[in-house]
Image: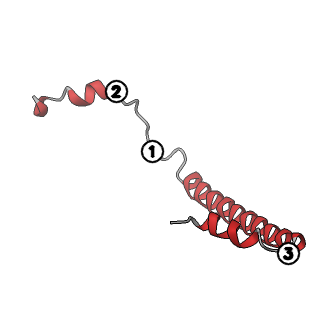
Amino acid sequence: MNSIAENIFETVKTLPEQKAAEVLSFAKGLKAKQEAEDMILRNRSLETLAKFRGRFKVEPFNRDDCYDRPNLR
């Protein structure tokens, strides 16, 4: 079973060079658009987290202490 990338390659390799370049340009445009959308989503997530910065007391976590509780003995 061929992957999508292999199917695209098989289809594009029969096209004239100029048409293949258009396909490549289109694919690069889609990639750039996806990266921009990912960056927007990342920035929105970071903005949400920034609202809560400093509101919670952070205590160091020691894994060994976690398992050394009386109710686990």
From mark 2 to mark 1, how far is it between C-alphas? 18 Å
Q: Is residue 49 toward the left or the right of residue 15 in the image?
A: left
Mark seen at residue 38: none
Which residue type carries mark 2? Asn
| Residue for badge 1 | 56
From mark 2 to mark 3, how far is it between C-alphas? 60 Å
In the depicted view, which residue is nearer to us: 73 or 36? 36
Q: Is residue 70 toward the left or the right of residue 15 in the image?
A: left
| Residue for badge 2 | 62
Given this view, does label 1 or label 3 mark the residue nearer the observer?
A: 3
Residue 2, image x, y percentages: 55, 65
Residue 36, image x, y percentages: 72, 63
State the SS at label 1. loop
| Residue for badge 3 | 19
Q: Earlier in the sequence, mark 2 or mark 3?
A: 3
In the depicted view, which residue is nearer to us: 62 or 25? 25
Q: Residue furthest front?
A: 14
From mark 1 to mark 3, how far is it between C-alphas? 57 Å
Given this view, does label 2 or label 1 mark the residue nearer the observer?
A: 2
Residue at left 20%, top 26%? 68
Quarter the C terminus occupies: top left
Given this view, does label 2 or label 3 mark the residue nearer the observer?
A: 3
In the depicted view, which residue is nearer to us: 38 or 73? 38
State the SS at label 2. loop
Q: Earlier in the sequence, mark 1 or mark 3?
A: 3
Mark 2 closeness class: few <14, some 14–19, many ≥20 residues within 10 Å: few
Query: Measured along the vertical axis of the image, is residue 63 above or below residue 54?
Result: above
Which residue type carries mark 1? Phe
Residue at left 11%, top 34%? 71
Which residue type carries mark 3? Lys
Residue at left 57%, top 58%? 48
Residue 47, image x, y percentages: 62, 57
